[in-house]
Image (cartoon, grey):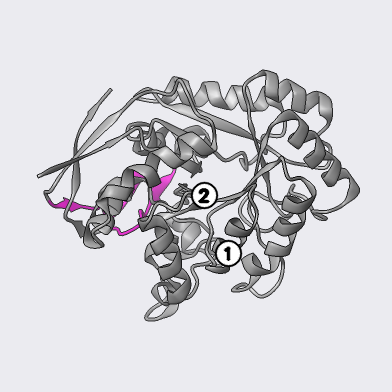
Amino acid sequence: MTFHITNPMDMHLHLREGDMLNAILPFSANIFSAGVVMPNLKTPITTTQQALAYKANIESNSPKPFMPLVSIFLTPNLDKAELQKAKDAGIKILKLYPKGATTGSEGGVGDILCEKTLHIFELAQDLGFILSIHGESYGFCMEREYEFLEVFAFIAQHFPRLKVIIEHMSDRRSLEMIEKYENLYGTLTLHHITLCLDDVLGGALNPHLFCKPMLKTPKDRDALLQAALSAHPKISFGSDSAPHLESAKLSAKGAAGIFSAPVLLPKLVALFESHNALEHIQDFLSNRAITHYALSDFPKKDIILERKNFEVPSHIDTPLGRVIPLYAGEILPWRIKDIHL
């Protein structure tokens, strides 16, 4: 038995840089037609010149045709001239991180609704940018996304022509928000629709499942899963695949991020099949993103999966050390058979 997915899109992807990028890029670039690539590198991508250089680096190292949708790291110093330059270069996504909220966000925005940032939102609206936001407050870890929803509401109300993405939704109450405001959309990860906090802490501590936003309750997981299975019209797939060295995950600080790229399509097909929802996976993995982000001229791919066991590797070797993938060592009932370009 085989199953086809055409032009899968990953609308939230961490590819890192240097040796790490070269080691993990094929897991995404071989399979996906395009992906929104995050700008929170060691030196954040805050200018058009940096973004174009990063795009060229990804393209030159990609083993198969792949369209990296690079984004600009939003800082209070972003001005109209730089935004216009980015637009003219074909860059359409701004990424906002609350300062210190997650990996590589130290240079993010401290006061989201300050005068400078609101002016950037106005410029972004006028120029037709998409504003993607890591939406978390600085409150109790399980309530941070919910507490940030009031910021999303403010932006949606005051900038109604600005398309805003609630990235990697982890709280079921975010679903209510995207349904309330026409210009609010969301992305969903594999880990937030299949796992909850019990998987991190319920037995022994599993640092490889520590991420931000945190995995939350079974009710949150199940509500988000249903939104994915039904291919909610305002939700795109975005893996938030984020590789960290095993040593960093096991360190005292415990790096936040889950490397899901090696398992995404086999696991998602198995998941949708188990819920009798395979008819919706093409919309969830591709069609919604093409519409929401107005994509065109991307590399065309037909991914053929077959119903044969796939053992998820226990680790991925990189020149810097080992990376542990999501569902390491598990046996999945589907595997990728072929990729037609």
**Left or right position of 285 against 314:** right
- Residue 115 highlighted magenta (yes or no): no
Identify which residue, 59 or 339, lies in the foreground. Answer: 339
What residue is pinned by disc 1? 176
Q: Name which residue type carries label 1.
A: Glu
Q: Was residue 315 drawn as part of the magenta stretch in this picture?
A: yes
Amino acid type at image mark 2: Lys
Image coords of residue 327 (percent x, y): 31, 59
- For the point 40% across and 81% down, the residue is 202
Q: Secondary structure at mark 1?
A: helix
Q: Which mark is residue 234?
A: 2
* Count of numbered labels shown in the rendering: 2
Q: Residue at x 54, y 62 (%)?
A: 175
Which span of residues is magenta-colored?
A: 309-328
Tell me residue 311's x, y (percent): 19, 53
- Of the numbered discs 2 and 1, the one sitting upstream in the chain is 1
Label 2, label 1: how far apart the Cα atoms are: 11 Å
Image coordinates for residue 73, horizontal then vertical, percent: 69, 39
Asked whether the viewer can see residue 318, the reply is: no
Point out which mark residue 195 bears.
none
